[in-house]
Image (tube, helix red, strand yellow):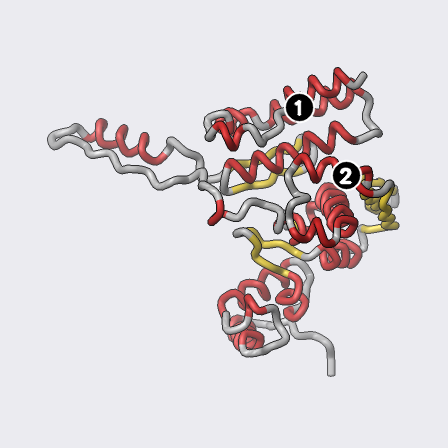
Amino acid sequence: MKNDLAPRNFDEAMNLSEMFANSKIVPQDYQGNVTDCFVAIIAGASLGLNPFQAVQNISVINGRPAVWGDAMLAMVRRSKLCGKVEETIEGEGDAAKAVCKIERIHPSGELETIERSFSMSQAKRANLTARKPWQSYPARMLQMRARGFALRDGFADVLGGLITAEEAQDLPDDKDMPRANKPRTLKVVPTGSSTDDIIHQLEQSTTDTPKTFTLTIPGKRKDTFHSIQEFGQAYSAIVNEVKDYEGFTSDEKKKKLQALETANLEPLAHMQKVDATNADELITSKEAFTDVEASH
């Protein structure tokens, strides 16, 4: 039997989704859920995953589709653009740091090495170490973070904007924290108002809060978040990564942080309007400038 489950049309995809939904060997979230099985199969097809791989490795965590770290590496390897992959853990305990080096093969045959790291000190600053997976498997979580950053930065075209499930688990849960898009009270337009007045009132009621927040990493990628808290956490993580990267000089770090801030002026301005308690948890690039200068 040929090992090819790929559906050729809508009916085949739906039939396969129904079979998966009635199975006990798919993840629990997919059991009895034909629609999610169908969406996972279609999403997996666009990423080169067969249907079974899709339902086993694609998860929706905190409202975002994500792929488990091992599957993400397999996708990149399958693309034939990936060369050597080297993952190491340096140091121990609070000084531990995971490093991922991965080669990308360009059409010319030239090799580009992408190196990313994630340390326990970064995890602590992002308040990750209190979470159960970080307490149980700290080295593994560090490894998945470094791997996720390296794969996403080096193979964004292959991954289509997906993040690792391990990283998605660390994002704030929408139900546990305030949304940036809180329901708005509709404004009552007085009787007899002109058309221009009505339009003006409607524009004010629908444009006061952005629906999404885009984090722009200059020269790399753009990530979209549905709350300012998610944006702030991701922005802070990148700032910390630049600060801690030993391959950059002090001047290079300041230039990169300035470029990052300039590319994200609009969401950063909105971030300053959030509740002071939440704002205190966010690391700004200006604070990072001070830390970089103080360390040299």
Instruction: Identify residue type, mark 2.
Output: Ser
Which type of secondary structure does the marked residue at label 1 adopt?
A: helix
Q: Is residue 113 left or right of residue 160?
A: right
Mark nearer the viewer, 1 or 2: 2
Based on the displayed image, in which of its 4 quarters is residue 124 positioned? top right
Image position, residue 247 (x, y; %): 84, 29
Give 157 or 152, whichever is nearer the viewer.
Answer: 152
- Tell me the tag on residue 144: none
Q: Is residue 45 above or below residue 144?
A: below
Q: Which residue is mark 1?
A: 259
Q: Is residue 243 left or right of residue 32?
A: right
Image position, residue 173 (x, y; %): 53, 48
Query: Which residue shows up at 19% across the image and 32% down it?
Result: 189
Image position, residue 52 (x, y; %): 65, 70
Query: Which residue shows up at 69% across the image and 19% down it?
Result: 289
Based on the displayed image, in which of its 4 quarters is residue 128 positioned? top right
Q: Is residue 91 left or right of residue 161?
A: right
Image quarter of the N terminus:
bottom right
Q: Is residue 57 visible?
A: yes
Give 100 or 217, whichever is nearer the viewer.
Answer: 100
- Tell me the tag on residue 119: 2
Q: Is residue 103 visible?
A: no
Query: Which residue shows up at 83% across the image and 46% down it?
Result: 102
Farthest left residue? 192
**Crowd around label 1: few <14 · some 14–19 · many ≥20 (10 Å):** some
Q: How many marks?
A: 2
Instruction: Identify residue type, mark 1.
Output: Ala
Which type of secondary structure does the marked residue at label 2 adopt?
A: strand
Image position, residue 166 (x, y; %): 67, 52
Q: Identify the mark nearer the N-term, 1 or 2.
A: 2
Query: Which residue shows up at 68% across the image and 53% down it?
Result: 133
